Amino acid sequence: MISSRNKSLTAAFVATTICGTINAFSTRCASSNHHHHISTTSTSLFSSTAQEQEQQLFYAAAGSPSVDMNKYNLPLPSCIENWTAVLQAETSMQSAGIFLKAKDSELFVDSLRFTLRRSGGLGLILTELAGGREDGVGITIIEEVVDGGNADGSGIQPGDSIVGLTVKKSISKGINVEEERVSVATECLAYDATIEALMSLPEVVSDDDEVTLTVKRLRRQPKVTVKLQYPPSDNLPDASIELFAGENLRRAMLTRGIKLNDKLAERFDSGGMGDCGADGTCATCVVSVGKGMDLLSPMKQQEEQILKTKPRWRMACKTVVGFGMTEGDLTIQLSPRQWEI
């Protein structure tokens, strides 16, 4: 028997529903946290571990990553400390519901997908961080990836939270056999509700059956340290600000009180006012990049044409820092035309 909050299940029944035998259940200390060990029934299934699966990621203004995003992963204790949930009202981009969130504003929640063999079990140990509610709402995460299990080497990490699973189910229709996808959602479910969702999946038919796991992962946001150098005529000391990857350079500087108003650049503005509203025509926000050009988004055609004789210059309004989710040091000179006087 296990804790009264878990269902008493035979290993054989679990093997046909969630693809593994449960070897051990336990309650952590005096709390209501539970562990779920999905393990293999045959070690021969795991003669070799899978290579980490490539992810197709895209981060809005920062674009597709040009670095290994695993460098921003958090250790398990930090994940345990920083996972929380939030009730989200319906928006044009997202339906209403309860979703995982990071407590620390310097962290972000990433979504990843992994495809694993079902036969023999997933090889994951789950633990509950929050639960005990009658509606089944809570937070359940992966505490351990079992050595030699199907998840071993896939890229799934301790601290990840499984938010969805999808399997293919074959359906016979006369002489034809069709496949349909069966999915279950597990985001912000307590331990028992998570196990119930896992058990609702169709049974394993062959050793080739696969399941696609969608997990959410806490990662730290990459940062770019920007050294600002003012024109000598301003008689101001250098300043330093810290930006997150994906921030627009002009907007970020303005919100941090950095003034951008190079009067010598007004000739690019169609109305002559020297403020085009970030359209990339007045060039009053132009900066000269002394270090860290590789941390910036590539130029588009309009900016490239306007600044074609100034290879180190960028329009701040058209520049994203930390492009490709990179981080590092950036040095820029403000109002570069004033440096040429």
Image (tube, rainbow, N blue to C red):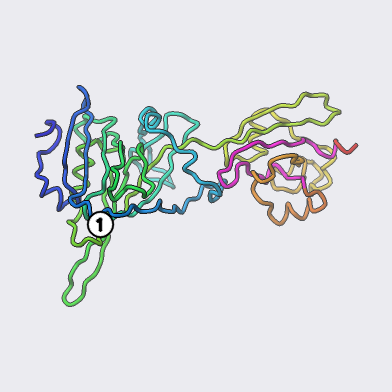
- Find residue 87 and report its image quarter: top left
Q: Position of residue 258 (x, y in %)?
A: 70, 30
The extreme bottom residue here reads 175
Q: Name the foreground residue: 153 vs 337.
A: 153
* Residue at the spot of label 1: 182
- Quadrant of the drawing holding the C terminus: top right
| Residue type highlighted by circle 1 | Val
Q: Quadrant of the N terminus?
A: top left
In the image, which residues are magenta?
A: 312-338
Q: How many numbered discs, if any?
A: 1
Residue under the image location 62 percent in, 37 percent down:
328
Expressed as whole percent of the image width and height from the top left, the position of residue 53 reads 40, 53
Badge 1 marks a residue whose secondary structure is strand
Please determine whether, in this image, residue 252 is positioned above or below residue 93. Answer: above
Question: Which of the two residues, 272 or 64, is positioned nearer the viewer here?
Answer: 64
Name the residue at 35% across, 30% down: 80
Left or right: 230, with 299 as reference point: right
Which residue is at a point 29% across and 51% down the rendered structure image?
150
